[in-house]
Image (cartoon, grey):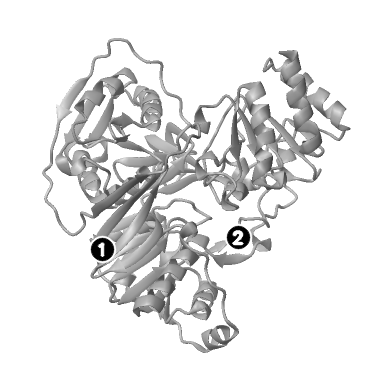
Amino acid sequence: MKLEDYKGVFVFAQQVDHKINDVALELLGKAKQLAGDLDTDVTAVLIGRNVKELAVKLAAYGADRIIVVDDPELEHYRTEPYTHALASVINEFRPEIVLVGATAIGRDLGPTVSARVQTGLTADCTQLDIGDFPIKKMNHQEQKHNQLLMTRPAFGGNTIATIACPDNRPQMATVRPGVMQKLDRIKNPKAEIIDYNPGFSKNDKYVEILDIVKEITNTVDILDANILISGGRGLGGPENFCILEELAAALGGEVSCSRAVVDAGWKPKDLQVGQTGKTVRPNVYIAVGISGAIQHVAGMEESDLIIAINKDETAPIFDVADYGIVGDYRNIVPMLTRQLMSNK
Amino acid sequence: MKIVVCIKQVPDTKGGVQFNPDGTLNRKAMLAIMNPDDKAGLEAALRLRDQYGAEVTVITMGLPKAKDVLIEAMAMGADKAILITDRVLGGADTWATSTTLAGALRNLEYDLIITGRQAIDGDTAQVGPQISEHLGIPVISYAQKLDIAGGYVIVQRQYEDGYHVLKAKMPCLITALAELNKPRYMTPGGIFDACEAEITTYNRGHLIDVDDANLGLAGSPTKIARASDKVKKGSGEQVNLDPEASVAYILEKLTEKHII
């Protein structure tokens, strides 16, 4: 089969417990744009057990077609049956592009599927475009058009690389949650729904689920916050986070933190911003007592407005802050909170 | 029981990141270390050995200087070490890297293969699951706890909102999270012995069932179209005022931007 015979942009529509993950909707938004550039359409691949009713939502966020793989073996995520499902869909329908959310599921499923269908995979992309490869025409090499150019940070966020997959199909990428924008919900969407079941026969690769433990946290999703007050090791201890929580309440924002804080056990991992945490882009990001290690900056530099408060005037966080305040947060933040409250 | 741990030598991005005057990264000034997730994987293997008895082999792919991490692993207690090094392997993406490692692993007996979840230079988390796929064995990624029972591994597999307890038949592959444990230090005796220990070197010829077309830069499906050391965002204003003036400054900026 020739490379040109692979058509369409496919999105893995991750669902857990019959809930579509937001990143799948974000990917549909991006897929729509890529499909526009390529003059093709967008297909969502929905995998699970009794999940067909979720197709409506995928259509509402931009899927022209939904392929549903529904089987009892797919009740909960397990690497093998999900890999078999997605790889079989790829082999049957031959998409040119497959996008997967860079979640704890997608970062497992993407690699196994790419190895099974023998194509490349670019991890944790932050930007996707259609363009030429090589980007500039070269004498000794054919320039291919309409390639997926996948841009990702590497090296702890220190470098940026744009990657293509010119000789294999599909072109596969995982994309970090929170990076792409979902479309506005379409009213009365029309989409074709296709049921497809490649058959599932158990083998040693089917691991057994002994227990499912949900760690109930009353924390909010920091990806949804418009204002984040983020604390680092400079806060001095977990008890001081209440100072940030008061400011967050006064501004209508939420509290997040750096990796050092999670490593120290002060705050749970789901509040962590950074390369190994979440990528956030709020309207305002106030970094308090955060030194600004590269890995942290990689997760927040796209924020619209960055304010940093730090005692150390040489802290690297000041290199990315729009407004940097050198000083002790203990003296500044409570006073700021009081004034905000009294202005209300 | 035979355990093989795949490890990688990486530049230390944590803390001591150094920049050149032009704002690009000064790689030469940075330390080369054993990748943290891999080190936790090695520690997990050593603990299983301590508890149940096992032979622990470490394997790495890289330039000849990657031998340093193998010596460190031996000094921590690994029994055997293998360095895969060959010019034809250079420039490999995750697909070609996992193909190479799988080709090398086919020389070995194993009940359990452990890799780190991801390396701090590439952060892809792809090589472990891809090796399992090439070898046709089960994989459990993101292991935050690991034990053995009979011919099975029992693993706590981390998710964003909790974990699954999974049971997989050996042989299988596990990718380890740094939070799995706190790796032991090298011992003086261990360091002494490690320097004397023999390290097996593999080259292209040792790779089993691997096509030349799947190796190195040429055998990598993904190609770099453009790479740049990231230009640091220009810093904004920085002020050093007393607390009252600092607060007034922040309020002024928030008002200016219509936040309040």
Q: Is residue A191 toward the left or the right of residue B240 in the image?
A: left
Query: Which residue sits furthest top?
Result: A187
Question: Disc 2 marks which residue?
Answer: B12
Specify the quadrant that holds the C terminus of chain B.
Answer: top right
Above or below, A184 against A5 in this view is above
Residue B45 location (% of width, % of height) = 40, 71
Residue name at image x 27 percent, y 29 percent: A44
Asked which quadrant contains residue B26, the reply is: bottom right
Visible in this render: residue B213?
A: no
Residue B170 at what x, y percent from top left? 25, 67
Depicted B257 relative to depicted A4: above or below: above
Q: Chain letter of disc 1?
A: B
Labels 1 and 2 within one chain: yes
Give coordinates of residue A28: x percent, y percent: 36, 26
Q: Is residue A277 left or right of residue B222?
A: right
Badge 2 sits on which subunit?
B
Q: Assign the N terminus of chain B to one quadrant of the image.
A: bottom left
The amino acid type, in three-letter code, at marker 1 is Leu
Q: Nearer the viewer, residue B42 or A67?
A: B42
Query: Mark 2: which amino acid?
Result: Asp
Q: Nearer the viewer, residue B75 or A230?
A: A230
B119 with respect to A228 (left or right): left
Distance of label 1 from label 2 (alpha carbons): 30 Å
Find disc 1 in the rendering and name its residue: B135
Residue B246 at least partly seen: yes
Q: Position of residue A90 (x, y in %)?
A: 22, 40
Residue at screen point 23% across, 69% down: B151
Give the answer, above or below, for where B97 lies relative to A147: below
Q: Is residue A68 above or below residue A211?
A: above
Callout 2: SS:
loop
